[in-house]
Amino acid sequence: MTTLRLLLSDSYDPWFNLAVEECIFRQMPATQRVLFLWRNADTVVIGRAQNPWKECNTRRMEEDNVRLARRSSGGGAVFHDLGKYLLYLYGG
């Protein structure tokens, strides 16, 4: 039986947290189970194929100090803030 490894980020930096998520995906053996929990400061995260100028009001984001980050996976645009915990579950 494989144990579950729990990782908690104390960073609110979306680029750091997305990098940790990517590292877990690329570096952890498939038999390792990982639960990664984190929060980001005000950020819109878009999928790898999305155009930020079509998906986001970038001018308004800049005025409101909302960050823009891109994840390596697909999917739609999602708004993150400190009121929302995010989780990434990996492994068998």
Image (tube, helix red, strand yellow):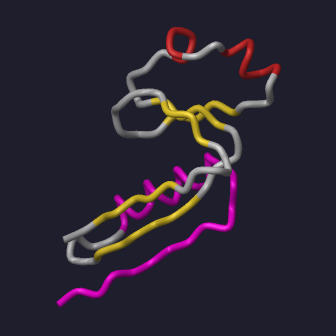
Whether 32 is drawn above or below 37: the answer is below
Residue extending farthest bottom: 1
Q: How many marks?
A: 0
Whether 40 is drawn above or below 58: the answer is below
Q: Is residue 17 magenta?
A: yes
Question: Which residue sits at x=60%, y=67%?
Answer: 9
Percent of width and height locating residue 7:
50, 74
Q: Quadrant of the C terminus?
A: bottom left
Q: Is residue 17 left or right of residue 3?
A: right
Q: Is residue 1 left or right of residue 38?
A: left
Residue extending farthest front: 83
Whether 90 is drawn above or below 18: the answer is below
The quadrant holding residue 89 is bottom left
Percent of width and height locating residue 77:
47, 28
Q: Is residue 35 left or right of residue 58?
A: left
Question: Which residue sits at x=53%, y=53%?
Answer: 19
Question: Which residue sits at x=40%, y=59%?
Answer: 88
Q: Is residue 78 magenta?
A: no
Whether 2 is drawn above or below 78: the answer is below
Percent of width and height locating residue 58:
67, 15
Question: Which residue sits at x=17%, y=90%?
Answer: 1
The quadrant holding residue 25 is bottom left
Percent of width and height locating residue 51:
48, 15
Query: Which region of the structure is painted magenta?
Result: 1-27
